[in-house]
Image (cartoon, helix red, strand yellow):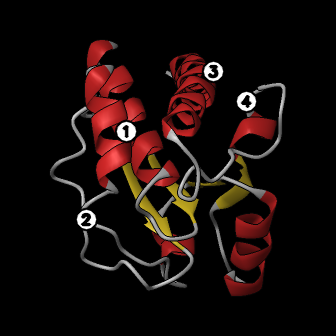
Amino acid sequence: MRILFVCLGNICRSPTAEGVMRQQLERAGLARRVEVASAGTGDWHVGNAPDSRTSRAALARGYDLSRQRAQQVKAEDFAEYDLILAMDSSNLRDLQALRPANASAELDLFLRRYGVAVEDVPDPYYGGADGFEQVLDLIEAACASLLDEIKGRS
């Protein structure tokens, strides 16, 4: 199974989701069976490491994002991934516009699909440290539900 997490610039929310999910898969012994990655709908940060505030907040909870580099979503991703999860409604609209007619990947809002109380992962980029903590809380909860789904498919 291949999963792609998508936000706007691929430096805050989607790299966090990639890091959290990667670690949950490793702990569950499923890391070799499920591939995870992240990308952004925009190209402003391609090649850059995650935002330093994102990395610090994630590292404080045990998630190392230091090897990740931002990339932009491409049309081919809809054939390469089984599941593409958007961090917010705007990202979902952008992905729907990019999606080729013959796309095989499932496309959905991450939090909505995995039963979290809100639909959108808020973008913490222009806020304070508490925003990065909130993003981690939401993503950890959704990743736990996604992991349950993956285990159910096994």
Label 1 and label 3: CA atoms lie apart by: 15 Å
Q: Classify the position of the N terminus by image quarter.
A: top left
Number of numbered discs overlaid on the protein picture: 4
| Category of crowding for the residue at label 2, using alpha-carbon neighbours closer than 10 angstroms: few (below 14), some (14–19), many (at least 20) | some
| Closer to viewer: mark 4 or mark 2 | 2
Q: Amino acid at mark 4?
A: Tyr
Q: Position of residue 19 (x, y in %)?
A: 34, 38
Nearer mark to the viewer, of 1 and 3: 3
Q: CA distance from mark 3 to mark 2?
A: 26 Å
Based on the displayed image, in which of its 4 quarters is residue 26 positioned?
top left
Residue drawn 77% across the image and 26% down it: 116
Residue at which label 3 appears: 145
Callout 4: SS: loop
Task: Indicate the secondary structure of the residue bearing disc 3.
Answer: helix
Residue assigned mark 4: 114
From the viewer's side, name the closer residue of 29 and 57.
57
Three-letter amino acid code at the position of disc 1: Val
Residue position for label 1: 34
Q: At x 44% / y 64%, what residue is drawn? A: 10
Q: Is residue 120 left or right of residue 33?
A: right
Point out the residue furthest to the left here. 67
Q: Residue at x 62, y 23 (%)?
A: 149
Q: CA gap, disc 2 to disc 1?
A: 19 Å
Q: Which circle, 3 or 2, is nearer the viewer?
A: 2
